[in-house]
């Protein structure tokens, strides 16, 4: 692919209605920051824009909860979110806000151009209206009984009890949340973007031109939307909060731009503000086809960034996105993150506990960045666990990456008088040469992954390079050569040459690690530069893979640990906080009718089968005689099950519900005729049947009394 003249990188605009959690960070902002830091290290022309999304019903709803105004809400959360990003090393070129007059003007101009060119249509429809409050009601201002689960306080867009997406018309006995009165239907006129006119363009652009270079989930979701038939989508709403329509638009009084229409235009207005701040021209970044526009988002924003906004851009005369590397969702400790249930880890909470707390350091920002990149949901949903976070820090950052940097500096000070030793070419071993030759190979692997948005794989290659450094030191053993001395106690010349070569190469490897790790862990990279007494300019990518970054005879600083060990007590505290927060939310944040126990919710009955299908299953009673956790698999237990006629190993995903020692002796129901399956390198021969209650807790299915292992279940 030909390198473009410039890059414009966007990260999804976060709603300024509350703190953002680490799922948001992992989905859009961290991968975008990694990519931008890499591009800037390449000295490419790149602008990274973002900003607060400050319109839509979410803002006044939050204002109502906090007993304040919408303006006060955005003025509260905009600077807090901006600071959160800075504390975690997210380095935007501009962090703007959609309440800014520049954005309002830009959004109105965009609407006017499309409307004047007749790219928009108008329709008159009936919508819910609150007669007492004298206002049309957005979906979130309507509550009623869910037709799916009978929950009495479902919103007009979704039931937060069963999760079903709804429309206000589906609610049973709807009422306005503003007055508590039943709404009426009233006619209103709105402007629409007729997406149905642009299906052929979208099909060619996405399903043909980008079918192979966009992520499969992105292409698949777009295909589903297009194949299902696109419909006109309203671009205006009857609200008093948002970007008001231009005054000269007939019938536009009292209407604002729908937030999904105005928010992505925020990328353009943010670029304009960057232009004003820097004195550079913003137009080429949105109008020159030699610009590469890339949107970093979560998968819930795919339709807006791949279908709706591109249609808007094409009609307005702007360039189209070259890629939209959307991430899947990040779950937390076995459950979906939920702001409403308070099952989440906010960026602010992490910053308070690990960075700003007494003893906290910037390096802890990098620990979070490391773990989130390691488990990045690039192709499927992934899961954050506090145990996984601890293991990533202690077993990898401390024991591998930090250990190599520290060992190299300690040995240099001990064996080479604190200076970069010379490289004795005549004394190089095959091991030395192989290590030096691996520098450029590491650069190629890391670079290729970063260019193709494979940040998880890129980080893996950086760690592999650090791991090879540890292996190199262990193989060369310079401390052993330091014992080869003459009668005067001086190290023999041949031994000193071996020591010098080993530590010279190790220190050059340290310098390369600073360059390679910088896009991922910027605070760590700067700390390495400090220890090596080099300026951050060394982090430019042109230096990556070079073997002569540090000059012979140059004095380096005394070693300092890059990372600290995270103790079990810290992890236990976080798990306790998570559980206590969700319990607090359940009892204090819901209305009286919402905490009334509801009838249990059941999964839909599956498609009917005939008896012969069921008869194929061989179900037996078994007894667990041994159980242990599977290494590096938070959900899995390795069970040894007595089936009477034989003993089997079964791997079961129940580790988060049971302690291994507590289930030994338990009777279990087992499917014994499943084909064997390897899980984490362990062959599993069978499946344990479990029951799951409404709270998600698993229970064994077993007989009341003692039944011999191997007995059939029918």
Image (cartoon, grey):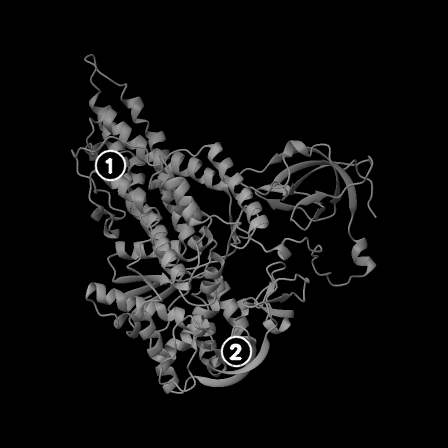
Which of the two residues, 457 or 532, is positioned nearer the viewer here?
A: 532
Left of 712 or right of it: where is 311? left
- Place of residue 693 in the rendered image (x, y in percent of width and height, measured from the top left): 69, 49
Mark 2 or 1, closer to the camera: 2
Which of the two residues, 180 or 143, is positioned nearer the viewer here?
A: 180
Graded by Cα atoms within 10 Å as few (under 14), some (14 to 19) or many (20 or more), the crowding at tag 1 reads: some
- Place of residue 709 in the rendered image (x, y in percent of width and height, measured from the top left): 79, 36
Determine whether 502 is above or below 379 in the image: above
- In the rendered image, the quadrant that contains the N terminus is bottom left
Left of 335 or right of it: where is 7? left
- In this view, which residue lies farthest toward the front? 132
User: Taking the image as drawn, is residue 93 in sight?
Assistant: yes
Tag 2 residue: 230
Tag 1 residue: 531
Graded by Cα atoms within 10 Å as few (under 14), some (14 to 19) or many (20 or more), the crowding at tag 2 reads: some
Q: Quadrant of residue 132?
A: bottom right
Residue found at x 28% / y 62%: 47
Using the numbered discs, state the Cα–Cα distance from disc 2 to disc 1 in whole angstroms. Answer: 57 Å
- SS class of the residue under badge 2? loop
């Amino acid at each position: 692919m030909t390198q473009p003249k410039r890059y414009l990188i966007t990260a999804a605009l976060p709603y300024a209605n509350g703190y953002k959690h680490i799922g948001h960070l992992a989905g859009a902002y961290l991968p975008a920051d990694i990519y931008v830091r890499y591009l800037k290290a390449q000295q490419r022309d790149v602008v990274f824009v973002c900003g607060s999304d400050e319109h839509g019903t979410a803002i006044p709803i939050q204002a109502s909860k906090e007993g304040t105004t919408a303006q006060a809400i955005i003025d509260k959360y905009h600077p807090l979110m901006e600071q959160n990003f800075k504390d975690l090393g997210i380095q935007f070129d501009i962090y703007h806000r959609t309440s800014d007059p520049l954005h309002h003007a830009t959004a109105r101009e965009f609407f006017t151009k499309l409307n004047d060119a007749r790219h928009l249509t108008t329709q008159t429809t009936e919508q819910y209206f609150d007669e007492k409050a004298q206002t049309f009601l957005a979906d979130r201002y309507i509550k009623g009984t869910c037709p799916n689960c009978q929950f009495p306080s479902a919103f007009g867009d979704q039931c937060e009890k069963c999760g079903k997406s709804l429309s206000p018309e589906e609610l049973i006995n709807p009422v306005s949340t503003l007055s508590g009165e039943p709404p009426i239907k009233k006619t209103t006129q709105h402007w629409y973007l007729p997406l149905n006119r642009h299906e052929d363009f979208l099909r060619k652009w996405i399903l043909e031109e980008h079918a192979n270079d966009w992520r499969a989930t992105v292409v698949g979701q777009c295909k589903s939307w297009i194949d299902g038939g696109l419909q006109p989508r309203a671009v205006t709403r009857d609200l008093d909060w948002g970007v008001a329509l231009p005054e000269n638009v007939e019938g536009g009084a009292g209407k604002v731009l729908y937030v999904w229409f105005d928010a992505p235009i925020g990328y353009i207005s943010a670029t304009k503000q960057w232009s004003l701040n820097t004195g550079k021209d913003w137009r080429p970044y949105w109008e020159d086809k030699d610009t590469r526009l890339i949107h970093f988002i979560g998968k819930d924003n795919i339709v807006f960034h791949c279908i709706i906004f591109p249609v808007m851009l094409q009609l307005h005369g702007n360039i189209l996105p070259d890629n939209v590397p959307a991430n899947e969702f990040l779950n937390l400790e076995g459950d979906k993150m939920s702001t409403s249930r308070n099952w989440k880890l906010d960026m602010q909470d992490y910053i308070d506990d690990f960075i700003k707390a007494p003893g906290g350091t910037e390096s802890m920002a990098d620990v979070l960045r490391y773990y989130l990149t390691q488990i990045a949901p690039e192709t499927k949903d992934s899961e954050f666990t506090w145990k996984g976070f601890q293991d990533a820090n202690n077993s990898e950052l401390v024991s591998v990456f930090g250990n190599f940097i520290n060992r190299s500096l300690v040995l240099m000070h001990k064996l080479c008088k604190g200076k970069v030793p010379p490289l004795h070419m005549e004394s190089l071993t095959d091991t030395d040469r192989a290590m030096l030759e691996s520098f450029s190979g590491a650069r190629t692997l890391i670079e290729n992954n970063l260019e193709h948005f494979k940040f998880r794989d890129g980080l893996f290659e950086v760690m592999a390079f650090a791991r090879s450094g540890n292996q190199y030191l262990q193989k060369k053993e310079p401390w052993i050569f330091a014992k080869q001395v003459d009668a005067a106690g001086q190290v023999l010349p041949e031994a000193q040459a071996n020591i010098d070569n080993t530590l010279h190469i190790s220190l050059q490897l340290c310098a390369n690690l600073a360059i390679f790790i910088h896009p991922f862990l910027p605070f760590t990279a700067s700390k390495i530069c400090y220890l090596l007494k080099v300026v951050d300019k060394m982090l430019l990518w042109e230096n990556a893979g070079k073997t002569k970054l540090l000059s012979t005879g140059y004095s380096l600083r005394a070693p300092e640990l890059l990372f600290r060990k995270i103790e079990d007590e810290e992890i236990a505290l976080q798990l306790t906080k998570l559980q206590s927060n969700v319990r607090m939310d359940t009892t204090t944040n819901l209305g009286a009718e919402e905490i009334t126990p509801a009838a249990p919710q059941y999964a839909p009955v599956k498609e009917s089968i005939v008896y012969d299908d069921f008869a194929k299953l061989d179900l037996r009673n078994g007894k667990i005689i041994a159980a242990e956790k599977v290494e590096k698999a938070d959900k899995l237990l390795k069970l040894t099950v007595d089936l009477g006629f034989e003993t089997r190993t079964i791997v079961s995903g129940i580790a988060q519900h049971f302690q291994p020692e507590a289930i030994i002796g338990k009777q279990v129901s087992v499917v014994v005729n499943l084909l064997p399956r390897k899980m984490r390198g362990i062959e599993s021969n069978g499946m344990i049947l479990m029951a799951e209650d409404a709270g998600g807790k698993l229970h064994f299915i077993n007989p009341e009394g003692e039944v011999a292992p191997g007995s059939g279940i029918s």
